[in-house]
Image (tube, rainbow, N blue to C red):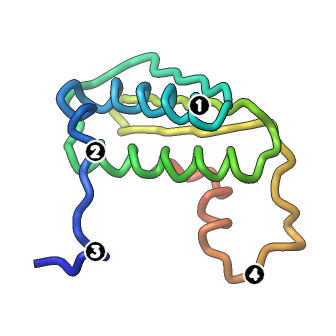
Amino acid sequence: MYPSAFAPVAIPRRYSIRGSRPALRNYCEEYGTLTSHRIIFRCDTFRASVPQAVELCVYRVMQEALQNAVKHSRVKEAEVDLEYGEWGVRLTVSDHGVGIDPRLRQATDSGWSASRSGRDW
C-alpha cells in the first residue's frame, strides 16, 4: 500500500470516461474560468492508443505548467498545444509573460534546466 502522500492520483473520473483530449480541454476551460484567464487549447491530431499512464502524466504536467503560467507570467492568456504522432506525445504550454530572470534561479535548479532544454518527453 502507498503512503497517502505517494498514492497514485487519477484523472478526475468525469474526464477519464471520454479520454485525455476532452479531459485536457475541459481542465483548460474550467481553470481559465476559475482564474479569469483565457486559455487556448489546441490538439490537431489525436491517437486514442496512448497508454493511460502517459495520459495521466500529460494531464498532471499540463496542470502544473498552467498553474505556473497563471501565477508567474503576469498575463491573462496561456496556450496549450498537444500533439500525438508516431514519435510520441508533445505537450507545449506557453504564455507571453515576463519570464524568469535567470539571475534569480539557483544553479542547482534541475526543474528549470529540464523545462528550458527543449526536450520532448
Which quadrant of the structure image shows residue 105? bottom right
Question: In the displayed structure, would residue 59 be above or below residue 117?
Answer: above
* Mark nearer the viewer, 4 or 1: 1
Q: Tell me the quadrant of the picture where the N terminus can be found.
A: bottom left
- Of mark 4 and mark 2, the one earlier in the sequence is 2
At x 24% / y 32%, what residue is drawn?
Answer: 14
Q: CA distance from mark 4 to mark 1?
A: 33 Å
* Mark nearer the viewer, 2 or 1: 1
At x 38% / y 29%, what residue is drawn?
Answer: 84
At x 60% / y 23%, what residue is drawn?
Answer: 40
* Mark nearer the viewer, 4 or 2: 2
- Of mark 2 and mark 1, the one earlier in the sequence is 2
Q: Residue 100 — which label?
A: none
Q: CA distance from mark 4 to mark 2?
A: 34 Å
Point out residue 68 in the picture as x, y percentages from the top left corner: 64, 52
Q: CA distance from mark 2 to mark 3?
A: 15 Å
Q: Which residue is mark 3?
A: 6
Q: CA distance from mark 1 to mark 3?
A: 28 Å
In the rendered structure, are the residues bearing label 4 and label 1 in contact, judged by CB atoms less than 8 Å apart? no
Relative to 54, 63 lies left or right: right
Please tell me whether mark 2 sits on a helix, a strand or a loop.
loop
Relative to 77, 29 lies left or right: left
Q: Which residue is mark 1?
A: 32
Q: Which residue is mark 2?
A: 11
Q: Residue furthest left?
A: 1
Local crowd at mark 2 within 10 Å, few (<14), some, or many (≥20)?
Answer: some
Local crowd at mark 3 within 10 Å, few (<14), some, or many (≥20)?
Answer: few
- Of mark 4 and mark 1, the one earlier in the sequence is 1
Q: Which residue is mark 4?
A: 107
Question: In the displayed structure, would residue 72 be above or below residue 87?
Answer: below
